[in-house]
Image (spheres, rainbow, N blue to C red):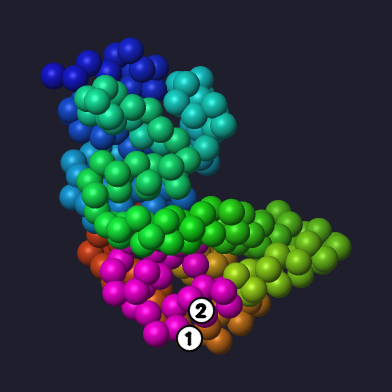
């Protein structure tokens, strides 16, 4: 049996099954990327709720895994060379899971790199820009009298949706016929703009026909339906 007692995070969030991947997360757009990927891959895992509403991500135990204090993070007792691996950053975790399984990414080198560029497009563009849109449109930023920040992030969100819409023209998924980590990285953020931020009208969401149909395809997958609620928001 794996002994995770050397890891402070595992002492704080005790593992019921220390043999499987331990996921420390919350159902945000970044958090659900990993639970969805784990469900798609069929990898056994145990989810631990790190409530960002209660500040769990700032505890000493969580920061022992991620000094940046952000979810998600994982502890894999069976990491590379059979040694335990702690890992944070959703993009890095997605890449790790594909390397561990050889799935959800094209097998050829050119396809793999093309897929990764779209993962990083999400990490560097869609995630930060959509998140700022949410802050200035739905949360505290809506009370700021100067509306230039909101206009800036709404405009950039529309631009990025346009880039994605162009990529999806004639394609079922970002990489074509195959569903990959590029889709898993991206669709939770697109869903959030429409459904959680309720900013569809602001960014003219309905005008991006390819994005709309792709989002529904992604969300209809059984692994998405399950992973979007892991771990539960309330617990």
- For discs 1 and 2, the disc positioned in front in the rendered view: 2
Task: Residue 145: give x, y in percent of width and height.
Answer: 85, 62
Asked if the residue under mark 2 is in contact with the one under mark 1, i.e. CB atoms within 8 Å, the reply is yes
| Left or right of residue 148: residue 33 | left
Q: Nearer the viewer, residue 232 or 102?
A: 102
Would you place residue 63 above or below residue 97 in this image? above
Quarter of image, res 114: bottom left
Q: Residue visible at 55% across and 87% down?
A: 207
Q: Which residue is mark 1?
A: 209
| Left or right of residue 3: residue 66 | right
Q: Nearer the viewer, residue 232 or 114?
A: 114
Q: What predominant SS class does the magenta segment belong to?
A: helix
Would you place residue 101 above or below residue 143 in this image? above
Q: Which residue is mark 2?
A: 165
Specify the label residue 37 is tagged with: none
| Left or right of residue 1: residue 146 | right
Task: Residue 107: give x, y in percent of width and height.
Answer: 27, 57
Task: Report the residue that reaches farthest toward the left.
Answer: 1
Task: Residue 100: give x, y in percent of width and height.
Answer: 26, 41
Q: Nearer the viewer, residue 121 or 62?
A: 121
């Amino acid at each position: 049996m794996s002994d995770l007692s050397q890891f402070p995070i595992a002492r704080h969030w005790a593992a019921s099954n220390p043999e499987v991947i331990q996921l420390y997360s919350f159902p945000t757009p970044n958090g659900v990327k990993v639970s969805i990927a784990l469900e798609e891959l069929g990898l056994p895992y145990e989810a631990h709720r790190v409530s960002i509403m209660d500040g769990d991500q700032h505890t000493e135990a969580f920061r022992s895994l991620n000094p940046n204090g952000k979810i998600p993070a994982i502890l894999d007792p069976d990491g590379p060379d059979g040694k335990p691996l702690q890992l944070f950053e959703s993009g890095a975790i997605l890449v790790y899971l594909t390397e561990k399984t050889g799935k959800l990414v094209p097998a050829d080198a050119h396809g793999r790199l093309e897929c990764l560029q779209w993962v990083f497009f999400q990490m560097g563009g869609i995630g930060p820009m959509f998140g700022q849109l949410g802050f200035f449109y739905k949360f505290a930023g809506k009370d700021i009298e100067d509306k230039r920040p909101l206009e800036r992030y709404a405009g950039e969100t529309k631009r990025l949706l346009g880039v994605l819409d162009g990529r999806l023209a004639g394609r079922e998924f970002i990489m074509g016929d195959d569903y990959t980590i590029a889709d898993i990285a991206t669709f939770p953020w697109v869903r959030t703009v429409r459904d959680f931020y309720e900013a569809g009208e602001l960014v003219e969401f309905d005008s991006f026909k390819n994005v709309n149909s792709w989002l529904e395809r992604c969300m209809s997958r059984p692994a998405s339906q399950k992973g979007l609620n892991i771990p539960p928001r309330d617990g």
